Amino acid sequence: MFPRSLIDPLSEFKGPLAYIASSTNEVEDWSNEVELMSRDFIDPVPDIVGEASDIGGRKNMPDDYLPASDAQFNSWQTNLVTYANANLAGLGLVAGDLAPLVTAQTAWTSSYSAHITTQAAAQAARQLKDANRLAYEAAIRALVNRLQASASVSDPEREALGIPVRDKTRSPIGVPTSRPVGSANTSQRLRITVAFVDELSPTNRAKPAGVFGCEVWVKIGGVAPTDLSECTFLALDTRSPYTAQFDGEDANQTAHFVLRWANSKGEAGPISETISATIPG
């Protein structure tokens, strides 16, 4: 045993113990104890199996058997105390062993019941508040509508009340400046459906501000037109798409469509690129 001291840096702790011991077995026992002490000395930090987390103001260890939610915990603890009280002898317990649990259970049950009652009251109060607001808003709107329609209420008075002051001056409608972008669908016999959007918002089907509708013009056969003087006016369509119906004699000819936006005053904007498609026969 003692030759190990030549390579054991803690052997000087073991040596005196060996001399004090009165037998070989005692020496072995002391040596084992010193080895354990030396391990702690070399590596004093123990392995960490798990860390506690704080849930709802309490420490919840990993793999904790206590339910996390209050409702589940309440059911669980009721069963625990009830069963333990009914089976004291079998569990090796006496009534005094459960006294701390019963005291804590009484405090818990009281506070949990108060919490549930408070939550229910808060929900009922919110529902009542929302219903009362809806009724109040309806009464406000009725009065404001009356004030807005009254000739005796001035705009400064409307501003003082915090209600909208309507613009009585109409904004002028300008001539459209952008162009429609069209696409043709020829899936039906003797029909071509032309869809249109604005070139400035090609992913949006809405018309530009101030635009009333889209003028649809067509030229059948020949080369694409250079201007509207070569085309026939078909419609002023207020909503995309527009479907053009053709006669049998037009089948297999090319229809050249030209589009342009128009406002409510009939003022038109620039013409679109030509949309050409074969009339299906």
Image (tube, rainbow, N blue to C red):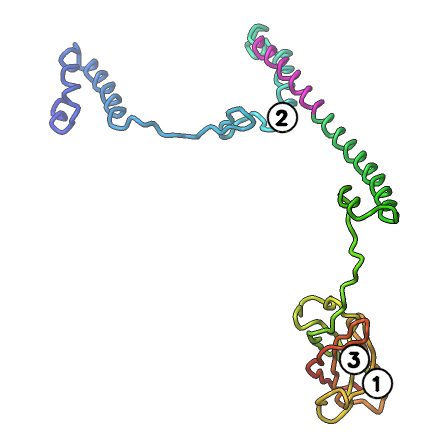
Q: Is residue 19 part of the magenta span, yes or no?
A: no
Say which residue label 3 marks. Answer: 216
Quadrant containing the N terminus is top left
Identify the amino acid type marked 1. Phe
Magenta-drawn stretch contains 99: yes
Image check: 259 left or right of 65? right
- CA gap, disc 1 and disc 2: 74 Å
User: What is the number of callouts on the image?
Assistant: 3
At a point 51% along the width and 30% down the height, the residue shown is 63
Tell me if residue 75 comes above or below residue 226 in the rendering.
above
- For this orientation, the residue located farthest to the bottom is 222
Quick one: label 1 or label 2, which is nearer the N terminus? 2
Q: Dot 3 lies on which element?
A: strand
Query: 238 and 83: which one is in front?
Result: 238
Picture coordinates of residue 87 (x, y %)? 62, 12
Seen from the viewer's position, the closer of residues 243 and 97 is 243
> Which residue is rendered at x = 71% and y = 92% of the image?
223
- Secondary structure mostly taken by the magenta-highlighted segment of the chain: helix
Q: Could you tell me if the residues under marks 1 and 3 are in contact, i.e. CB atoms within 8 Å? A: no
Q: Position of residue 183 (x, y in %)?
A: 71, 77
**Amino acid at dot 3:** Val
| Disc 1: which residue | 246
Q: Residues within 10 Å of mark 2 (few under 14, many from 20)?
A: few
Q: Mark 1 or mark 3, which is nearer to you?
A: 3
